[in-house]
Image (cartoon, helix red, strand yellow):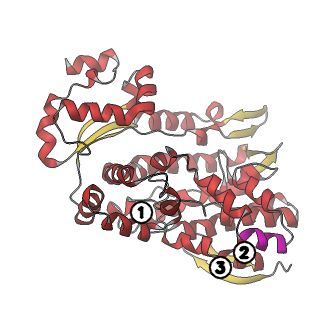
């Protein structure tokens, strides 16, 4: 097939993105076009009104960066085509509102990466790939971070993160997205399939970690966004069944909200509250680091049971007290740096990276949300009755 660019798309982050014939054909499928109606950042737009970017432009950005890195690493043409195809397709399995409902859908066994693989292997996408001389299974493996180039797309420091952190900061209008992506790309090498950053690229890698840290603290975990997500997740739990799971995850944001509006009851009430911005209020917040390890494990497994017990004890109607216990992956802090004395974890060579990891862990909070009219009841809440706190914090409640 021809590798000459057949289309140029103007992107506010990367400038001109050149699409070859294969990318153009893949982009025109309904699976990629659906991403135009999947918000990149769920309900962030409630706080940052311009955060309406979608998985579609993000996928184009990842495709572009994968091409730049492929050129730098001098990979073969067929490997480049596989990698860029995987980059363009890596998000097609996302459910509505991206990661917002991962926990709820996950309780039914849904995983967006698994669905992405299914679409790559068992749809018209497979035919397009085969007609271009590509192996759909190899493309699917790359999406999961497998294969000799898989870590480029899914690892501690990958082109996926390089795009979304800068792109999200741009659309949020915050000044945290100052990451030297070009410098970082050209400081990367592959060693036995793993992504390695050269010592000369350490500052660029640190800038990515700073961006991540600030975006998570200020944007991704903003309390208003978290409240809206908790409300809608609870509404989805009341609506979701084994029978309608496939239909719901295949819809886009517009179809999902339309369904929620139309069913009536609690789900429609939650959508109406978000439309009118009559959100629940945060009435309790506790740093996760203050909760003992055993209780953290219990919260991870049985959040809904603990939530129901608290609501019952405080005489709050079911569904109107929401317990928000965040989980966070810290794999971005596991990148390796090539130094004069060999490969070392970035945490061993960068005091800044160590400080950022500690900061991110310490700012994770467990929150409780209720309706405004129920907030006086929280005065009776005793956290030690539901989870164990470090003694130094428990003293403040007794």
Image coordinates for residue 394, horizontal then vertical, percent: 27, 18
Tell me the residue at 55%/50% (across/down): 110
56 in the magenta segment: no
Q: Would residue 60 be found to the left or right of residue 325 on screen?
A: right
Asked if labels 1 and 2 touch by Cβ distance under 8 angstroms, the answer is no
Residue under the point 84% across and 61% down: 79
Callout 3–callout 2 Cβ contact below 8 Å: no
Which mark is drawn over residue 23?
Answer: 2
Residue 161: quadrant of the picture: bottom right
Q: Secondary structure at mark 3?
A: loop
Q: Which mark is residue 172?
A: 1
150 shown above or below 58: above
Q: CA distance from mark 3 to mark 1?
A: 28 Å
Q: Earlier in the sequence, mark 2 or mark 1?
A: 2
Residue depicted at 32% across the width and 48% down the height: 223
**Marks 3 and 2, Cα distance to the nearest angstrom?**
9 Å
**Is 218 drawn above or below residue 136 in the view shown?**
above
Count residues near mark 2 (Cα–Cα under 10 Å), then give few for <14, some for 14-19, many for 20+: many
> Which label number is shown at residue 28?
3
């Amino acid at each position: 097939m021809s590798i000459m660019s057949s289309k140029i798309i103007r992107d506010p982050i990367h400038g001109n993105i050149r699409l070859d014939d294969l990318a153009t054909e893949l982009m025109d499928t309904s699976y990629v076009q659906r991403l135009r109606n999947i918000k990149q950042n769920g309900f962030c737009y409630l706080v940052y009104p311009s955060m309406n970017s979608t998985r579609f432009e993000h996928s184009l950005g990842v495709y572009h960066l994968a091409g730049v890195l492929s050129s730098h690493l001098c990979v073969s043409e067929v490997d480049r085509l596989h990698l860029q195809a995987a980059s363009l397709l890596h998000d097609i399995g996302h459910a509505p509102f991206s990661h917002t409902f991962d926990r709820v859908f996950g309780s039914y066994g849904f995983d967006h990466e698994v669905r992405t693989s299914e679409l790559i292997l068992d749809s018209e996408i497979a035919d397009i790939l085969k007609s271009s001389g590509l192996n759909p299974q190899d493309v699917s493996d790359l999406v999961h971070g497998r294969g000799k180039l898989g870590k480029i797309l899914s690892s501690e420091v990958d082109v996926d993160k390089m795009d979304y952190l800068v792109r999200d900061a741009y659309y949020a209008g915050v000044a945290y997205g100052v990451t030297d992506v070009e410098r970082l790309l050209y400081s990367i090498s592959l060693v036995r399939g793993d992504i390695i950053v050269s010592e000369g690229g350490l500052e660029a890698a640190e800038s990515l970690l700073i961006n991540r840290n600030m975006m998570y603290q200020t944007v991704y975990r903003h309390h208003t966004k978290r409240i809206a997500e908790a409300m809608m997740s609870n509404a989805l739990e009341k609506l979701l069944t084994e029978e309608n799971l496939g239909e719901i995850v295949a819809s886009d944001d517009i179809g999902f909200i339309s369904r929620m509006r139309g069913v009536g009851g609690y789900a429609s009430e939650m959508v109406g509250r978000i439309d009118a911005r009559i959100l629940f209020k945060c009435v309790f917040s506790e740093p996760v680091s203050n909760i003992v390890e055993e209780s953290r494990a219990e919260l991870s497994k049985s959040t809904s049971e603990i939530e129901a017990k608290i609501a019952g004890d405080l005489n709050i109607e079911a569904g109107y007290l929401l317990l928000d216990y965040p989980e966070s992956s810290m794999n971005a802090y596991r990148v390796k740096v090539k130094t004069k004395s060999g490969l070392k974890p970035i945490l061993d060579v960068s005091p800044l990276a160590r400080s950022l990891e500690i900061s991110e862990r310490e700012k994770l909070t467990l929150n409780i949300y209720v309706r405004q009219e129920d907030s006086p009841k929280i005065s009776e809440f005793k956290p030690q009755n539901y989870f164990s706190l470090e003694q130094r914090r428990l003293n403040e409640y007794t």
